[in-house]
Amino acid sequence: MLDTVDVSLDCNCRIQPCFVDALKRHLVDNHPLVIGTTTADAPVIARILVGSKQIRLGAQPDAERLVHLTELIRRYMRIGAPIEMHTMWGATKAYAQFEHKGVDALDLLGLRRFACLNTQVKQLYPPGLKVRICREDITEVVLTSTTPQQASETRALSRVYGGQFRDLNGLLGLDFINIVEESELAAEMPAQLPYEAYLRRIRNNAGAFFRYWLKLHTTNFATQDIDEFYEVKKLGLAGPVTKSQWDHYIERVRSEHPKADLAERAWHSSMYLSNAVTRSSLKFVHGTTSDDRGTIPPIRSSFVPYPPGTPRKLYMGRVEYKVKDSKHSKKTVAPWSGYGLMIPRSDSYVLSAVGVREYRELQEVCSPVVLRLSGMGRSVAVRADVGPVH
């Protein structure tokens, strides 16, 4: 990916001459799926998008999910259109917890994932992919801000990361990827909700989710046997949120709000679920291509796995990826939710994906390194810090 741009280094630490080459090795398709055919048909393309064990997050989809995915692809191929994919992307870097709030090596890896998939698809099906990345600018305000001042600061931080991310995508020439803001899509929907109106709807509905959590937390009732469940079901919830799922969301909140107590984390989780249901009801994830059956739904991709117990129907037409190739490890970090550290290994470096909690402990022993990428009339500074030897 970096072969078409000029790369220079800016750092105050001692690094080996192989640093850039070591990073480049992580940005090529080291594990293309071996498909054994040159025939373009939907099942083969489906196999490519599901991916090998090295890039796939989780188990191979079962037969029903593969059939559903294949049929979506077939609809695009029948009319010769690019296959649409939609993915959500965080609006701030590492939840704006640290000094560095712009793009880094993990963002390169995230874009690399789609670039490699597109290259392999185009080898069999020239129209390739059409990827829409939706940055969660509203979600970030929902999860991090409780006052107008905090919301304003969050939006400013979102613009920093978002601007650099767009510049990086343009610099790399990935014109099949379109980056949009969540707030832009809200205004485009049939309801045409302005930013503030969308936020009000989320906050109003979050109260119902919090009451649902509180009842489950303080009683032994089953998830679907209480009035509070039917209250959130009316909002568009696909199925019950079990106690284990609530625990999953509440634990995730720790990364952004390490000092929050249980009730506060439950409230933030309620806001997250309210936002997810609101997005679904407004059909945020929508296609832009139509055939004789109507609008073709895009394939939904994600670097974040669904929690255990997620309703099965939500997995239909969805693929999940690791940001960094690994055949044996199930550990992954979404590009926006951590950093990529270059770890010294004898005469080279290995790129390691590090989440917020781990980085919080490592940041004092990391050495800042800035890659200055130039080309196509743009220049972007990408961090690729050197981490400690493990």
Image (cartoon, helix red, strand yellow):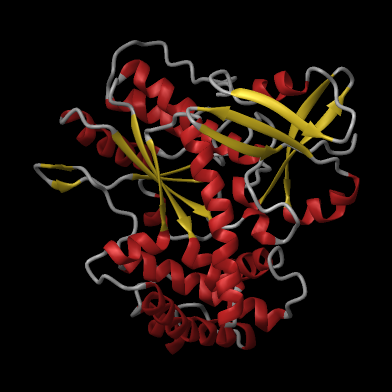
> What residue appears at the point 40 percent right and 69 percent down from the top-left corner?
277
> What residue appears at the point 58 percent right and 29 percent down from the top-left corner?
374
Which quarter shows the N terminus? Answer: top right
Q: Position of residue 85 (x, y in %)?
A: 37, 41
- Extreme residue toward the front, this view: 377
> What residue appears at the point 60 percent right and 37 percent down from the top-left corner?
380
**Is residue 254 at all visible to an observer of this figure?**
yes
| Left or right of 303, for residue 352 | right
Q: Nearer the viewer, residue 163 or 71?
A: 163
| Left or right of 281, for residue 2 | right
The picture quadrant where one finds residue 284 is bottom left
Q: Position of residue 324 (x, y in %)?
A: 64, 34
Q: Nearer the viewer, residue 114 or 45?
A: 114
- Extreme residue toward the left, this view: 292
> What residue appears at the point 56 percent right and 38 percent down from the top-left corner?
110
Question: Is 17 placed above or below 185 here?
Answer: above
Q: Nearer the viewer, residue 24 or 370?
A: 370
| Left or right of 63, for residue 306 | right
Q: Position of residue 116 (x, y in %)?
A: 49, 26
The picture quadrant where one finds residue 213 is bottom right
Which quarter shows the C terminus? Answer: top right
The picture quadrant where one finds residue 282 is bottom left
Question: Is 278 placed above or below 312 here?
Answer: below
Q: Position of residue 335 (x, y in %)?
A: 61, 45
**Is residue 323 at all visible to an observer of this figure?**
no
